[in-house]
Image (tube, rainbow, N blue to C red):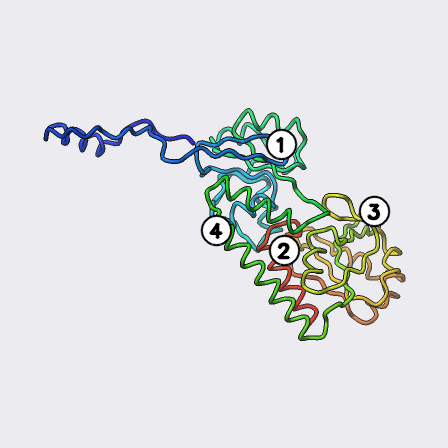
Amino acid sequence: MRRSLVLTASTAVAALALTACGTTEPAADPAAKTSAKITLTDATGTKVTLDGPAKRVVGTEWGAVESIVSLGVDPVGVADVKGYTNYDSAVPLKNSPKDIGTRGEPSTDTIASLSPDLVVATTDLSSAVLKQLRKVAPVLTLRSADASDPIGRMEDNLDLVARATGTTAKAAKVKKSFDAKIAEGTKALSEAGLDGTKYAFADGYVVSNQVTVRPYTSGSLIGAVSERIGLKNAWTVKGDKNYGLASTDVEGLTGLGDVRFAYIANDKDGEDPFADGLAKNSVWKSLKFVRKNHVTRLPDGIWMFGGPESMEAYVDAVVDALTK
């Protein structure tokens, strides 16, 4: 960690006064280390050594930024600050960090200008970009997602950032709150007779007037949390090995049957791919869950790839949608 090697005026005066009084106590060394070094191994197998808990932290991916903020650390740099603000309202930024560029191509020059103690990145960045970042500051690379254990990955990432920033006690509180919310959501659905309800969550986008639907399978973080509170994931398509996401079209929804369907969109993107993009689509209108009005758009600002606090917001939203 960077520490000033210059004595303040008041410290210097105090030191002179002690000398004048004939004290035999040695003057404090202003450069003395107050924290032991921290050595961590990140998702790439790289050992990352810090002089002490990182204070000036940069986040290159929104999930990493959410972990940083949840732990009570105000990042000095964030990739696409405007985007984070639009898509992650569950864990808002409490300061005004410098925008370091896009999540896929952060600016090393901008990051260097911030003199960070630590850059928290993810495996979504290329090895070439990570190599450049390591020339600027220590880089702690998180595995962005893991479809084999989405919730475990989310919590492990939080713990790794906590160890790097000296906030492990705060991480324990964040995880305890998440567990309590899962229990609360499970109880609410059970009491409403919705335990085991077939449920499908998706997002989507429109290109050339064609709607592409992105299913969140059991391997997604959203899918895992949904199952944890007692819902049954209705998607049968296979998701990718990291995020547990798949791709289909409106015809691919016909196999879902009688389900509760929820999706997320964002007003900042303009058109709602389901309410607007499929409003006149005959296949969409014929779906049983559409005809039964079992389609819910969840509130904007829940980051589907975030941390425990985003997932708490998701639990509140889906329980509210299904029980009202």
**Mark 4 to mark 2: distance in Å?**
22 Å
134 relative position to 194: left or right? left
- Give the distance between the C-alpha atoms of the residues marked 4 and 3, in whole angstroms: 46 Å
> In this view of the protein, which residue sits in the foreground, 196 or 213?
196
**Tag 4 secondary structure:** helix
Q: Which residue is mark 1?
A: 45
Q: Are marks 4 and 2 in contact (CB under 8 Å)?
A: no
Of labels 4 and 3, earlier in sequence is: 4
Question: Callout 4: few (<14), some (14-19), or many (20+) C-alpha neighbours within 10 Å?
Answer: some
Quarter-of-image position of residue 11: top left
Residue plotted at (44% across, 32% down): 51
Residue 322 is at least partly visible in this image: yes
Q: Earlier in the sequence, mark 3 or mark 2?
A: 3
Q: Identity of the amino acid at label 3?
A: Ser
Whole-Å distance between the Cαs marked 3 and 2? 27 Å
Residue contact between numbered discs 4 and 3, judged by CB atoms under 8 Å? no
Q: Which quarter of the rendered picture does the N terminus lie within? A: top left
**CA distance for labels 1 and 4:** 25 Å
Q: Give the residue at mark 4.
A: 170
What label does residue 302 carry, if any? 2
| Inter-mark Cα distance, 2 to 1 | 31 Å
Q: Secondary structure at mark 3?
A: loop
Residue 260 in the image: state x and y as whole percent.
77, 66
Horizontal arrangement in the rendering, residue 119 relative to residue 192 (left or right):
left
* SS label for mark 1: loop
Task: For marks 2 and 1, give the one nearer the viewer.
Answer: 1
Q: Quadrant of the C terminus?
A: bottom right
Give above or below for 252 relative to 80: below
Q: Could you say which is closer to the camera, residue 286 or residue 253?
A: 253
Residue type at tag 1? Gly
Residue to which mark 3 is pinned:
208
